[in-house]
Amino acid sequence: MPFEGQCGSYYDFDDIEITATAGVTYSIEILDAGFDTYRHLTDELCTVVASKDDGGYDLFSLIVFTPTVSGVYAIVVTSYGSDVTGCYDTTLSVY
């Protein structure tokens, strides 16, 4: 599932909701960005279940997770530094 977005300042973020199935492994990756990205993954209660600054190519963030509970999760994308803006592409892969 590709998604294109744009982050403004450090306090700006995009919130992308997904429905995940327990026991299935998902990879959430930034493919192209003009800035250092930071990503959180939250559950239905807005509890952070994973977060990653880097881990993908260069300064791009990558999260691989296998939920223990099926439900709606939110991929939260922001920038690592303050006063940083830019566009990005992200993908969700299922394994």
Image (cartoon, helix red, strand yellow):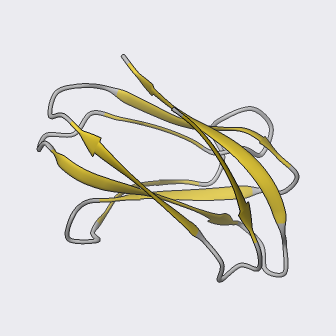
Instruction: Kindly identify the residue that appears in the image at 84 percent across and 57 percent down.
Output: 35
**Residue 77 location in percent, x, y?**
58, 60
Total marks shown come to 0
| Residue 90 lies in quadrant | top right
| Residue 45 lies in quadrant | bottom left
Determine whether 46 is above or below 30 in the image. Answer: below
Determine whether 25 is above or below 80 in the image. Answer: above
Q: Can you say which quadrant of the picture contains the C terminus? A: top left
| Residue 26 lies in quadrant | top left
**Residue 89 location in percent, x, y?**
71, 42
Instruction: Kindly identify the residue that appears in the image at 71 percent across and 78 percent down.
Output: 10
Instruction: Kindly identify the residue that appears in the image at 24 percent across and 25 percent down.
Output: 24
| Left-right relation of 22 to 2 | left
Instruction: Kindly identify the residue that appears in the image at 84 percent across and 81 percent down.
Output: 83
Determine whether 65 is above or below 82 in the image. Answer: above
Q: Nearer the viewer, residue 63 or 92?
A: 92
| Left-right relation of 50 to 53 | left
As drawn, which residue projects farthest toward the top?
A: 95
Q: Which of 90 and 82 is in front in this view?
A: 90
**Residue 64 location in percent, x, y?**
43, 34
| Left-right relation of 12 to 39 | right
**Residue 58 location in percent, x, y?**
80, 37
